[in-house]
Each structure stands twice: as structure tokens, then as C-alpha cells.
Amino acid sequence: MQFPDIEITERLFLYFGIVAFIIFVLVVFFINRFTVKYRDKGEIPVQSGGNEKFEVGMIIIAVCITTFFLVMTLMGMKSIQTIPDNPKADLNIIGHQWWWEARYTESGVLTANEIHIPVGEKILLGLTSADVIHSWWIPDLGRKLDMIPGMKSYMWLYSEKEGEFLGACSEFCGAQHARMRIRVIVQSREDFEAWEQGQLKEAKFSSDALFNRGKQVFEERTCTNCHSITVNQDSADIGPNLTHFASRKHFLSDMKENNKENLRAWLKDPQQVKSGAKMPNFIFPEEELEALVHYLSNLK
Ligand code: CUA
């Protein structure tokens, strides 16, 4: 048995598909039939008036189809929207231009863009936005829902199978809307908890000189004004939390694989990589760039 949300949506989609296909076939059939029947034979055809019975019949059919889908849709919406009164989201997702912030209520995990959930469990998502309207949509995991600034919307997230599922922002939100991708990683309960435990640890310290130089650059060059390297819920969240940056396989909302080469290109000239992104160009000298890349790619 699938999760009812997905089952209802898929069934409705199937019915729409069947009816649309039948109408399509009829339209193509009649276009062809009348094209052949009334093709130019050198005489001007006689114009005929309306056909009351036929017109009334057509209106009745159209009203019946529309009513059927209206009722089906309303019933589907009612059974999908089973959000409790005074809901408390398990996972809050906040849309930003152009990335996704994720806050796990119970554990306090803070992450971005790569969302982990346990398999076979209903997760209540609380969706909102920090700037403009975004829209959450992971096609394999059900419907989409707009994320509106100043308002929290709720929906269930559920997957019966493990794996990685890709989604995209589905509401135009500016220059990098098309690249506002999201990845949901569905894991067994044990793997999920192990991941959570890892994410809850504070950033590692190291005696490695280059690592510490990177840390120093990160702090002195005001990266900390927007990005946090701590799991404190009140920390800066203008840009993604980077405490465990290197544990994410992709960055820039799933745009690039998270490796040193891509990270260096991004830090060197953000606009070249993702034009319009809010990340300023700090014009780092080579030595600082080297240290930063080393530092960030060691934050597992
Ligand atoms: Cu965010 Cu489109």
C-alpha cells in the first residue's frame, strides 16, 4: 500500500489522463473526417445553422466531466490535508533565494539542500520562506506546496522506499529559480539516526595548520555574518549552515558536486558559477582561497 497522498494524486492524474486522451482522439478523428468530407470540390458549401439537441448534449457532457473532476479533486484534497490542529512540524523547510534551509524540530539538526528522512515514517513538514514565494516539490514523493513568506504551510512527507529523490522549486523566484534543486535522502531508521548524531556534533577542531588558517580566514573575512559553523538554532542563516558542509554530496542547491575543484571555483568568483547568487566575491588571494577550500572540505 502506498501512502494515501500519493495514491490519491496518482489516481486522479490517471483519470484526467484517460478522459483527456479520449477527447484528444475524438477531436483528431473529427478534424480528419470533416477535412476529407468537406474538402474543396469547387463549390461553395451551404452554411447551416445550429443544432439544439447536439449543443445541449455537448454542454451536458462538459458539465458532467467538470463536475466529476471537481468532486474527485475536493474529496482528494480533503483526505490529503489531514493536518492536526495546532500542528508542530517535525521538519521545517525555509526557502531562500536560492537554497533550502532545513531545521529538524526534535533533534535540532540544521542543514541545507540535502534533506534526510527515515523510510516509512510520516514526517510533518512546515514550509515557509525567508524572502519570496518558493514551492516545494519532490515529484516522486507526492504533491507540491507553495512556501510563502510570513506564513507556515504544512504537508506530509513520506517515502516507502529508501533512495535519493530529486526535486525543484516550482514557483518562479528569481534569477536562479531553475537551479533551486533539492535532494531528499530516504534512509533506514538506523542510518538516519547515525546521520543525525553526526550532524549534531559541533565542527571538528584540528591541529592542521592549513585548516586553522582556513578557519581564521572564514572568521576574519566576515563569512560568519551569513554562514554558521555551529549547530546553534539561533545562529546566522542568511546563507546555508556549513558546520557539516563536507558531509553533503552536492552544494549550491544540488547544482555542483561537492569537491575541492568546484568549491574553489565558487569561492573565487561566485557570479561566474551561479550568476545572481547572493554570495559576494571576496577576491580572496590564492593563499586564503587554498586555506578556505581546505577548511570547508574538512567540515564533515
Ligand atoms: Cu525558489 Cu523558484
Image (cartoon, helix red, strand yellow):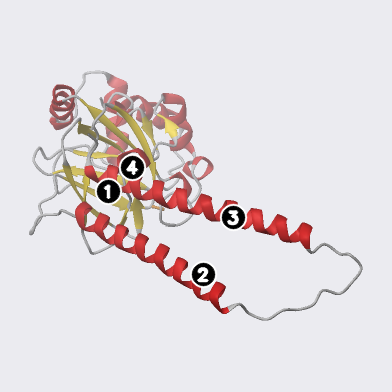
Q: CA distance from mark 3 to mark 4?
A: 66 Å
- Considering the numbered disc 2 on the image, is that residue within a helix, a strand or a loop? helix
In this rendering, the label closer to the viewer, 3 or 1? 3
As drawn, the label of residue 225 is: 1
Q: Earlier in the sequence, mark 3 or mark 4?
A: 3
Q: Are marks 2 and 3 in contact (CB under 8 Å)?
A: no
Nearer-the-camera pick, 166 or 156: 156
- Nearer the observer, 131 or 222: 131
- Comparing marks 2 and 4, which lies closer to the viewer? 2
The CA span between labels 3 and 1 is 62 Å
Which numbered disc covers residue 58? 2
- The residue pinned by badge 3 equals 26
Extreme residue toward the front, this view: 53
**Label 4 beta carbon less than 8 Å to ligand 1:** no
What crowding class fits label 4: few (fewer than 14 Cα within 10 Å), some (14-19), or many (20 or more)?
A: few
* Residue at (33, 29) in percent of width and height: 164
Which disc is residue 67 wearing? none
Percent x, y of residue 229: 22, 37
Foreground mark, 1 or 4, reads: 1
| Pointer 4 residue | 221
Q: What amino acid is at disc 4?
A: Arg
Kindly identify the amino acid type of the residue bearing the numbered disc 3.
Leu
Mark 3 lies on a secondary structure that is helix
Q: Residue at x 25, y 40 (%)?
A: 241
Q: Residues within 10 Å of mark 2 (few under 14, many from 20)?
A: few
Q: CA distance from mark 2 to mark 4?
A: 69 Å
Distance Cα–Cα, label 1 vs label 4: 9 Å
